[in-house]
Image (cartoon, rainbow, N blue to C red):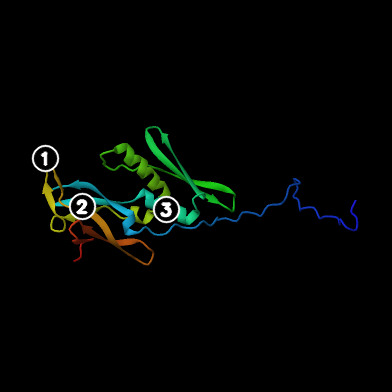
Amino acid sequence: MPTKNSPRRRAPSAGTSGGVSAKPVCFPVEVPKPAQTAPEGCRVITLAVDKDAARLMLLPDDAAVRKLLDDAYGPAGWCMRRYYAGSQLWCQVGVYSPDTGEYVYKDAAAMSIPANNPAKMQEITSFLAAAALWGAGSDVLDVSKMLLKTAQVPIVESADKKRWMLGTALRVDRFARDDTGRITMVQFATAEGKKILWPEAT
């Protein structure tokens, strides 16, 4: 029984089940979008080389993508796991939603990219593809495959004369973007400091 010094406390509001009423979830649930990928957060992948040109693609660095996710959601605000569906490696990246109190997951399969270590490449690209569904590194993965002509980049024959290869190392130096943030131009830098534009300036 309440006394002068212990007034009656008001009970929490309850729903039909007798529990405390929860704030309704409004859809769509808003989640932060990761920042754009910096040029230094990318690597150049050589897909094929012949005597006339080299076919390349860009991949975001997996450590850079992890940092983008950390910066957007906090280290404890996202998670990942890999699994096999048949013989295909998949990755699942989850982002915590405060509105629902649960993780929301998006899944993607590994990409088919030639590599000296195919298993490691599948491990990396499955994560990159899943993270891109949240926007982390998606700007880089959206860039189409690129062709650099021998007039732009040195191409040399291997010592055994059986294949052609790039005669220099390439790194991404700068990006040009449109108003939506889409990458429209890539500037490479060679090991010797030469700048190369893609698409080639006309």
Residue with the mark numbered 3: 67
| Mark-to-mark CA distance, 1 and 3 | 41 Å
* CB within 8 Å, label 3 to label 2: no
Q: Which percent across, then down, holds residue 177?
A: 33, 64
Q: What residue is shown at x 36% (from left), y 43% (from top)? A: 124
Question: Which picture quadrant has residue 198?
Answer: bottom left
Question: Residue extending furthest top?
Answer: 86
Report the residue marked by disc 1: 162
Q: Give the CA distance from mark 3 to mark 2.
A: 25 Å
Could you tell me which secondary element the residue under label 2 belongs to?
loop
Query: In terms of sequence position, does the residue under pointer 3 or pointer 2 come before the other?
Result: 3
**Mark 1 crowdedness (10 Å alpha carbons): few <14, some 14-19, many ≥20:** few
- Name the residue: 32% across, 54% down: 42
* Quadrant of residue 17 within the rendered picture: top right
At label 3, the amino acid type is Lys
Query: Which amino acid type corresponds to the residue marked 1 in the rendered image?
Result: Lys
Say which of 183 and 7 sits in front: 7
Report crowding for label 2: few under 14, some 14 to 19, many 20 or more residues within 10 A (C-alpha): few
Residue that label 2 marks? 169
Label 3: how many residues lie within 10 Å, few (<14), some (14-19) or many (20+)? some
| Residue furthest front in the image | 5
In the displayed structure image, the side of residue 26 where residue 11 appears, left or right:
right
Q: Earlier in the sequence, mark 2 or mark 1?
A: 1
Q: Is residue 68 visible?
A: yes
Q: Amino acid at mark 2?
A: Ala
